[in-house]
Image (spheres, grey):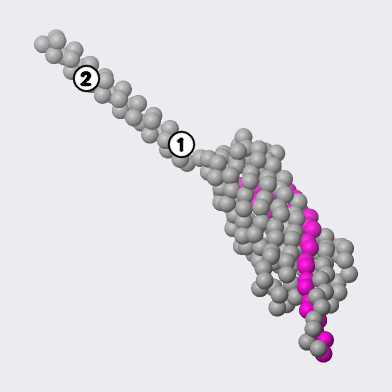
Amino acid sequence: MNIFILTLFSLLTFSSQAVNTGEITLNEKATSKSRSSKENREGKRLYLGFSIGRALGLGASSGEINYYHNSNFVSFFRFGAVQSEEHLDDGFTGAKFLKLGVKKYTGNSFYYTIGVFHRQLDTRVFKWDNSQNYTIHESMFRDLGVSTSIGNHWHWKNFSLNIDYIGINRTLVEIDEMTKPFKRVTKLTFSILNLGLGYAF
């Protein structure tokens, strides 16, 4: 009888320990899966990303490098380009831009940015004479300005998804004279729905 009671007690103790161990394992997994974007930014130093969307009034693709000062404050450098024969009809053949600024997270994933930009637009104009011969005139327009934007940047362990909802860009300095091909370029432009993917480490 005593042996039976001891055996039963041992089985109950073992089962209790197994259940507790299972609960701890499940809790650890749940904690790991429920880490917030802010927690996943902690300890990161660099982010490399690629995005597409409308930037500085241009449909462009761009690359981005971020440096994490801490989980809420980031410096960024973005560079993008447009190069398409579709622009030949309006005279535009390509564009490039650079942006340098800071990104401030106000919560888990929401952020705003403040920065400066440099933009270059290229044109190619065909001029025909009466003999149906033509000459090609190429020119460019460059400007400097300031920009700001808002968006969400979700971080997982290393991979991340970024959506820049809307940005406002204002030209402050025109490096080149705004000749006729560039008359429709406005000093105030908008960036809309830039979608980006990246890797942080």
Q: Which residue is mark 1?
A: 31
Q: Position of residue 96 (x, y in %)?
A: 74, 61
Q: Residue at x 34, y 29 (%)?
A: 22
Question: Looking at this rendering, what residue extends furthest in the top direction?
Answer: 2
What range of the chain is rendered magenta?
A: 101-130
Report the front residue among 17 and 98. Answer: 98
Q: In which quadrant is the C terminus drawn? A: top right
Q: Is 151 left, or right, of 126 in this rendering?
A: left
Tell me the amino acid under the disc marked 1: Thr
162 in the magenta segment: no
Compared to 185, does 42 lie above or below? above
Q: Position of residue 159 (x, y in %)?
A: 55, 45
Residue 36 makes an appearance in the image? no
Q: Position of residue 81 (x, y in %)?
A: 70, 60
Q: Is 33 left, or right, of 66 in this rendering?
A: left
Crowd band around label 2 with a 10 angstrom C-alpha radius: few (<14), some (14–19), many (20+): few
Identify the secondary structure beneath mark 2.
helix
Compared to 194, does 66 lie above or below? above
Report the front residue among 83 and 2. Answer: 83
Q: CA distance from mark 1 to mark 2?
A: 30 Å
Q: Which residue is mark 2?
A: 11
Tell me the amino acid under the disc marked 2: Leu
Which quadrant holds residue 128? bottom right
Q: Which mark is residue 20?
A: none
Q: Residue at x 68, y 47 (%)?
A: 65
Report the front residue among 48 and 129. Answer: 129
Q: Position of residue 40 (x, y in %)?
A: 56, 40
Q: Is 47 left, or right, of 188 in this rendering?
A: left
120 in the magenta segment: yes
